[in-house]
Image (cartoon, rainbow, N blue to C red):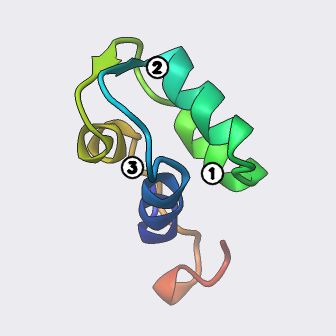
Amino acid sequence: MTYRDDLRVDKALQGADFPRTRQQVLDYARDRGADEKTLEAMRALPEGTYDNGEQVVRAVPQEPEGDLPGGSAR
């Protein structure tokens, strides 16, 4: 997950009630109109139940932002 993914995931989950399963988290984000980059990052979530949005954000796997300094390739 990049810093921008972190912000996207957090925004996509605003207003969500928890706990939620992985699939419920994905469904909520999709239903709220999350963009494809956000959904792509969230599809990498491990199966399980999440107690809050912060837990979801931390669970999205880290990914480098690109080959160029500062991650500008992303």
Residue at the (54%, 38%) spot, across then down: 42
Q: Quadrant of the C terminus?
A: bottom right
| Number of residues whose C-alpha sits closer than 10 Å to that of mark 2, classed few (under 14), some (14–19) or many (20 or more) | some
Q: Is residue 19 above or below residue 34?
A: above
Q: Which residue is mark 1?
A: 38
Q: Give the Cα separation between the discs numbered 2 and 3.
A: 17 Å
Q: Is residue 63 left or right of residue 35?
A: left
Above or below, 47 against 31 in this view is above
Q: Residue at x 53, y 68 (%)?
A: 65
Q: Residue at x 59, y 33 (%)?
A: 28
Q: Nearer the viewer, mark 2 or mark 3?
A: 2
Residue 26 x/y as whole percent: 59, 29
Give the spatial CA distance, label 3 vs label 1. 13 Å
Q: Earlier in the sequence, mark 3 or mark 1?
A: 1
On the image, the x and y values in percent for residue 5 come to 51, 60
- 50 relative position to 66: left or right: left
Residue 30 vs 36, above or below: the answer is above
For the residue carrying disc 3, how many other residues have a C-alpha within 10 Å: few (<14), some (14-19), or many (20+)?
some
Q: Is residue 11 found left or right of 55 in the rendered image?
A: right
The structure residue drawn at horizontal position 42% and vertical position 56%, both measured from the top left corner, is: 10
Secondary structure at badge 1 equals helix
User: Which numbered disc, 3 or 1, marks the residue closer to the eye?
Assistant: 1
Q: The disc labelled 1 sits on which kind of residue?
A: Thr
Residue beneath disc 2: 22
Q: Amino acid at mark 3?
A: Gln
The secondary structure type at the circle numbered 3 is loop
- Residue identified by numbered label 3: 62
